Image: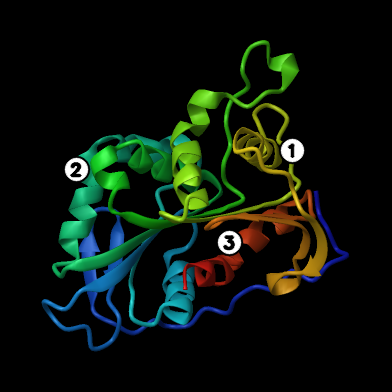
Amino acid sequence: MVENTREHRRLDRRDTPGERISTRFGEIVLPPHAKPGKPLPLVVHFHGEPWLADQSVREAFPKAAVLGVQLGSGSRIYAEPFRDPAAFQEILAAVNRPVSKVYLTAFSAGYGAVREILRQPENAARVTGVALLDGIHSGYEPPEEARKPMASDLDSFMQYARLAVAGRARMIILHSEIFPGAYASTTETTDALLAALGLKRHAVLHWGPHGMQMLSDTKAGHLRVVGFAGNSAPDHIDHLHALEWALRYFD
């Protein structure tokens, strides 16, 4: 589908200065003048052009390091390497500096990596905040006609959302109105999360980042779930370009 009513503003690419550290998952970009031995926050973003993650993080968190991970299409390609807890530890070690806070962000299929990391108690304990941009999907519980998201696909997100509601972590979820049909949409999965937490959506009508239209904004503790209008490809890509906006929730 194509949507031509709303403006779908896109970021212009700029060079992001800073020392670069090569890893098998991409380049970690350190903030300018980062000093050896001085702790710094780290943002690891999954799925989407790395330059966009670099640029968005530098705008939101000028003193943070950033790693943009672009592995390909489909949540499985992100999940598989991070089923090994050592993969996440490898990233932390590559920074070669103390990491004070860790933020995991993901667009679309990138949620597969975040889900696996949060399933690992030793790694989940290192995560300060999570931002998911139109990207929690799941299968359907049998019978599929009931269209109930599969709980086993949402387990670690649910656990982390509970921590956020209790004020022990920060979590922001953005989603569109896109319904894939063959598997649970981001609307259905966030509805399932909210229902399990005993929360109801708060309807709003506001302009969001880059011409996005906000339809709901639900908050509890340090959890925020924001629903946006749109059932087209441009509406989906809007969420990637909203990364900087989502990151500011962690301030």
Q: Is residue 93 left or right of residue 156?
A: left
Outermost residue to the right? 5
- Give SS at disc 2: helix
Asked if 67 appears above or below 119 in the picture, the reply is below
Q: Position of residue 125 (x, y in %)?
A: 29, 48
Q: Position of residue 228 (x, y in %)?
A: 74, 56
CB within 8 Å, label 3 to label 2: no
For numbered disc 3, what is the local secondary structure?
A: helix
Measure the C-alpha gap from mark 3 to mark 2. Answer: 27 Å
In the rendered image, the vertical position of residue 148 relative to residue 215, given as above or below: above
Residue depicted at 63% across the width and 27% down the height: 149
Residue named by callout 2: 86
Residue tagged 1:
179
Residue appearing at x 34%, y 42% in the figure:
117
Q: Is residue 84 above or below residue 21?
A: above
Q: Quadrant of residue 216?
A: bottom right
Q: Nearer the viewer, residue 29 or 247?
A: 247
Instruction: Give SS at disc 1.
Output: loop
Q: Which residue is mark 3?
A: 240
Of residues 251 and 69, the one drawn nearer to the viewer in this rendering: 251
**Residue type (three-letter) at the residue carrying disc 3:** Leu
Label 1 environment density (alpha carbons within 10 Å; few <14, some 14–19, many ≥20): some
Dot 1 or dot 3: first in sequence order is: 1
Mark 3 neighbour class, 10 Å CA radius: few under 14, some 14 to 19, many 20 or more: many
- Describe residue 198's horizontal placement relative to residue 16 as left or right: right
Q: Amino acid at mark 1?
A: Phe
CB within 8 Å, label 1 to label 3: no
Horizontal and vertical percent position of residue 150: 57, 24
The residue drawn where x is 57% and y is 31% is 138
Closer to viewer: mark 3 or mark 2: 2
- Of 251 and 6, nearer the camera is 251
